Image (tube, rainbow, N blue to C red):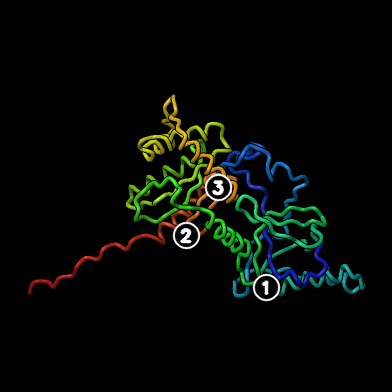
Amino acid sequence: MFHNPRELAMTVRLHLVPGTGHAAAQRKDSAATSSWPKRPGLFGSVAGVAALAFMSAAPVHAGEPDQITAQPQDAAKAQAHGDPLANAQADAEQQLHQTFTNLRFEDFGPAPVEGPLYQATAGGKIIYFAPQSEHLLFATVYDRNGVNLTALAQEQGASRRLKAIDPAKALAIGPGDAPTVIEFTDPDCPYCQALDRYWNAKAAEGKPVRRLIFFVSGIHPTAAAKAEHILCSPDREAAFRAAYSGQTPPVLRQCAAGRDKVAADAELVARVGVSGTPTLIADGKLISGFQQAELEAFLDRHAKPAPTKAVTDAPR
């Protein structure tokens, strides 16, 4: 429980551990957009993971019309009896009411989390840990102005990790003058294959990208061999296209340079903290999974303006 609620001027929205793609427990989600490792990791080894719901609503702020707010009536009644804990709860409820004036909420009370919260990055995602009560929180934290502090921390972490990536060591696919995306991918990942089809479709629409490819080979058992085959092929881009469309030959190419590159990519994946595929970095922002809306926004930001037609005077 937060013993000084006045210090908590933020809204927290918590999510369950995403079951996207091939998770450690092989969960499947129809909205999944990424593949995750089968080997035990953070999600498979932490006991007693708690998925807590402080509030089910996204943050809303002053100036938003026609919202119904809850009144702290029950807490106020308890406060009149002089109970210190009830007084703290009433103060916290009143502060929530005053800080987020248009927020609808009910069933206000102490959360099972006790003591301070600490922030960490796992697989490119921000998580929160309460050591006193041993709770792990997958959360989105907003301040009173609606700023997504979790997203800011995630972007700052991505910027730091970006410094570890040498673009010259990537497998480059696409025209050199196109918008650049760093892509961590796996030839056997179905979401990576869907992403490849998406990029191909966008290129056909006149919206190509330059993809800087690094291979993730620790999730699927044949990913490393297929990545090596691509890297050892005379036409690596053509081999990439074939592999991602399920057309790899029965005998895969092998070479020392390809093996070394797969191993170097694996080291980079561990250093950067990539744990699911596809993982992209676009405009310095980390994108986990095949998030089509974010990719559309990226392409829109880099869209070239349509050429203007010359206007001529009509004949007189």
In this picture, is 98 found above or below 163? below
Residue at figure coordinates x 46%, y 40% from the top left = 193
Q: Which mark is residue 283?
A: 2
In this picture, is 250 found above or below 287? above
Quarter-of-image position of residue 26: top right
Residue 49 position, x and y percent, is 75, 48
The amino acid at mark 2 is Asp
Q: Residues within 10 Å of mark 1 (few under 14, many from 20)?
A: some
The amino acid at mark 1 is Thr
Q: Which mark is residue 268?
A: 3
Q: Which mark is residue 101?
A: 1
Disc 1 on helix, strand or loop?
loop
The amino acid at mark 3 is Leu
Residue at figure coordinates x 89%, y 74% from the top left = 80
Q: Please tell me which of labels 3 and 1 falls first in the chain.
A: 1
Q: Please tell me which of labels 3 and 2 falls first in the chain.
A: 3
Residue at figure coordinates x 64%, y 56% from the top left = 126
Q: Which mark is residue 132?
A: none
